[in-house]
Image: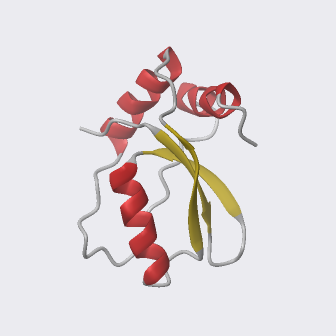
Amino acid sequence: MITIDLIQEITRIDGTTYFDISNMVMNGRAELAAIHGLIKQVRIIQLNIPRSTAVAAYEDYLNAHFTLPPENFTEWQEWLPEVGTQSETDYHTIIRENHIG
C-alpha cells in the first residue's frame, strides 16, 4: 500500500519536468532512475505534505493503478493521473495546497 508524503520534481530525459506526488521509497526509485539514465534528475520539492481529503483520494488512485517497482526496474513509469478525471483534480489540489508550481 502506497502512502504519499512528498512532492518531487522529475526532469525527463528531454528536459521537461513534472511534479510527482509520492513517498521516500519512490524518491529512492527516482534517484536510481537518474543514476541509470532513465530520467535526467529528481529533486524533492516538499516533504511531509499535510494529510487532506485530496491526498487520501489520490493515494486510493495510486494504489488502484500503480505498484511499487522493484529495485532492478529497467524503465521509468510516471505516476500521473488520467486527464479529465477526479484524480487529476485531486493532483492539482495537492499541488495548489502545497504552494507548488
Residue reaching furthest to the top: 53
**Nearer the observer, 25 or 74:** 25
What sort of colour scheme is used for the picture? secondary structure
| Residue 95 place in picture, x, y as percent | 65, 34
Is residue 19 shown to the viewer in this render?
yes
Which residue appears at 48% of the width and 26% of the height? 55
The image quarter containing residue 85 is top right
Q: Is residue 1 above or below residue 71?
A: above
Q: Residue at x 37, y 62 (%)?
A: 28
Which quadrant does the N terminus fall into? top left
Task: Find residue 90 and report its horizontal and vertical position in percent.
Answer: 57, 26
Q: Is residue 101 toward the left or the right of residue 46 in the image?
A: right
In the displayed orientation, state which residue is furthest to the front.
47
Quarter containing the C terminus: top right
Residue at the outermost right position: 101
Q: Residue at x 65, y 55 (%)?
A: 18
Occupied quadrant, residue 68: bottom left
Query: Image point 44% across, 23% down: which residue?
Result: 57
Q: Position of residue 37 (x, y in %)?
A: 50, 84
- Is residue 76 shown to the viewer in this render? no
Q: Is residue 3 left or right of residue 96?
A: left
Residue 60 at x, y = what percent? 36, 29
Q: How many marks?
A: 0
- 86, above or below 100, in the image: above
Judged left or right of residue 11, residue 65 is: left
